[in-house]
Amino acid sequence: MGTVTFSKRVDMLSSQIKEFEADASKEKEAELAAMFRICDRLIECGQQPSRLLRRYSELKNKYRCIVNPYRELDDEISACKMHMEASSRKNSIDEVARSVQEVVAISNYINYAINDARFSIDNVMEHLEEGEQYGMMANEELQIIRRRKLWRAKIIRSVLLLVTVIAATLILVKLVF
């Protein structure tokens, strides 16, 4: 299973959840939990397409609602802690900024769930989707800012190179004549 892509794993999760809905057993629950852990690690390790991430989030929320809807808060708190630990190990500004935004989105979700436990699962899903959209917008803004800074650095580097070449040429002309 080392060569199974993230897309295939998401498809496998979908079929396993359908089977679990039909016949819930501890063995199938353990298999699903293991598959979700593997997918979570794949998401942490590399960039996955946003379409697959949305589908994966939907499957994960569906699974949580089937198994135990109230365990979701504990899982989110654990995910928040793990995410904070992982983000403390990363050095790049872009990674830290995106991690902070995700932690804020998760903490906002936890606050909403604690303050109003009577929300239906559909309303909670809407809040998660809004947080995901906000995170994607903020990430796009950070990428634009980063591109601008890289562009400015290239211009400065080119100007310095041009000035150095002109200075070297003038020194060479002065030495020759």
Image (cartoon, rainbow, N blue to C red):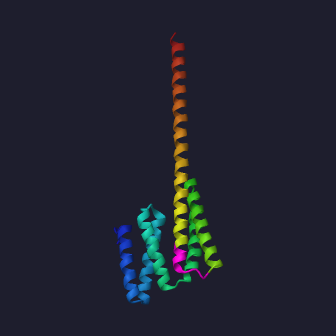
- Relative to 55, 71 lies left or right: right
Q: Residue furthest right?
A: 115
Quadrant of the rendering where the N terminus is positioned: bottom left
Was residue 106 drawn as part of the magenta stretch in this picture?
no
The x and y percentages for residue 14 are 38, 77
Q: How many marks overall?
A: 0
Image: 97 above or below 55: above
Q: Quadrant of residue 160?
A: top right
Identify the residue at horizontal 55%, vertical 82% (top origin): 71
The x and y percentages for residue 66 are 47, 84
Q: Quadrant of residue 79?
A: bottom right
Regarding residue 35, the answer to whether it shows in the image is yes
Regarding residue 92, the answer to whether it shows in the image is no
The x and y percentages for residue 104 are 61, 65
Q: In front here: 126 or 142?
A: 126
Identify the residue at horizontal 64%, vertical 74% (top origin): 111
Q: Which residues are magenta?
A: 117-125
- Relative to 30, 142 lies left or right: right
- Relative to 74, 47 lies left or right: left
Identify the residue at horizontal 58%, vertical 80% (top origin): 119
Identify the residue at horizontal 54%, vertical 44% (top origin): 148
Q: Quadrant of residue 80?
A: bottom right
